[in-house]
Image (spheres, helix red, strand yellow):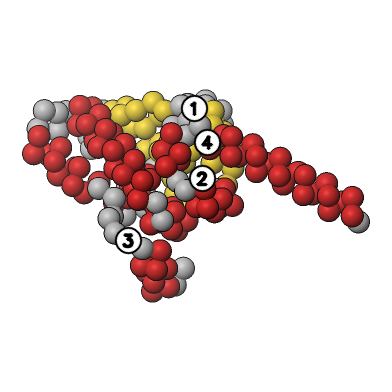
């Protein structure tokens, strides 16, 4: 029995070390304090997906974000009756899905796997708690969101070159500031989650 417990412990520690190494390569996560990173590691779910897998569709409720370990993900937007526009191609050590979580808004685009994808998923409730505990992460995600808004504005013809529209997109994409863990837990309790 003792050797079985020891084996399980070693397996869990090996998984944890591997996860720390993989997630440590994701730039914005270097802003997360160690105690919150330990919580994040406990909460992420590993996903291994085939080409063509749709992580989410445009208009879906935002329920999670993703950290790519390997593979390629296409972010694309359907423009009504017009053509589909590829907004971004993401790969190893990139993240996606965070913009709609930050805005608490429906997905602005679709995300699908272009190759075999190894990723980790972090659900919205856990994301909110980690974000509330890390002002540096809030700032890093705001900066990343601003960069992505610029890319988005260039990729969508009706926003291209229009500073007023880009300003609106930046405003609605800014992460909530000054949100505490208690605020999030109160909101979750009110929603019954």
Q: In this rendering, which labeled residue sits more in front, label 3 or label 2?
A: 3
| Alpha carbon distance from label 4 to label 2 | 15 Å
User: Which of these two is toward me, 72 or 35?
Assistant: 35
Q: Is residue 189 above or below residue 43?
A: below
Reading the image, the residue beneath label 4 is 24
Element class at badge 3 = loop
Reading the image, the residue beneath label 2 is 121
Q: In this rendering, which labeled residue sits more in front, label 3 or label 1?
A: 3
The image position of residue 114, as x and y in percent, is 47, 26
Q: Is residue 24 left or right of residue 78?
A: right
Residue 16 figure quarter: top right
Crowd rating for badge 1 (residues with CA inside 10 Å; few <14, some 14–19, many 20+): some
Q: Earlier in the sequence, mark 4 or mark 1?
A: 4
Answer yes or no: is residue 2 visible: yes
Reading the image, the residue beneath label 1 is 92
Q: Earlier in the sequence, mark 4 or mark 2?
A: 4
Element class at badge 4 = helix
The image position of residue 127, as x and y in percent, is 44, 52
Element class at badge 2 = strand
Q: For the residues labelled 4 and 1, say whether their Cβ atoms are less than 8 Å apart.
A: no
Reading the image, the residue beneath label 3 is 179
Crowd rating for badge 2 (residues with CA inside 10 Å; few <14, some 14–19, many 20+): some
| Alpha carbon distance from label 3 to label 1 | 30 Å
| Alpha carbon distance from label 1 to label 2 | 14 Å
């Amino acid at each position: 029995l003792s050797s079985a417990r020891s084996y399980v412990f070693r397996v869990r520690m090996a998984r944890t070390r591997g996860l720390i190494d993989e997630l440590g390569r994701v730039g914005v996560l270097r802003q997360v304090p160690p105690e919150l990173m330990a919580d994040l590691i406990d909460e992420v779910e590993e996903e291994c997906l085939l080409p063509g897998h749709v992580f989410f569709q445009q208009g879906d409720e935002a329920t999670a974000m993703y950290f790519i370990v390997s593979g390629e993900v296409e972010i694309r937007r359907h423009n009504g009756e017009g053509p589909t526009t590829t907004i971004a191609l993401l790969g190893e050590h990139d993240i996606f899905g965070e913009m709609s979580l930050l805005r608490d808004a429906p997905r602005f685009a679709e995300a699908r796997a272009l190759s075999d994808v190894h990723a980790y998923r972090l659900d919205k409730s856990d994301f909110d708690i980690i974000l509330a505990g890390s002002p540096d992460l809030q700032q890093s995600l705001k900066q990343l969101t601003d960069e992505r808004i610029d890319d988005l504005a260039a990729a969508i013809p009706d926003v291209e070159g229009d500073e007023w529209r880009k300003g609106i997109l930046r405003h609605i994409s800014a992460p909530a500031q000054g949100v505490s863990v208690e605020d999030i837990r109160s909101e979750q309790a009110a929603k019954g989650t």
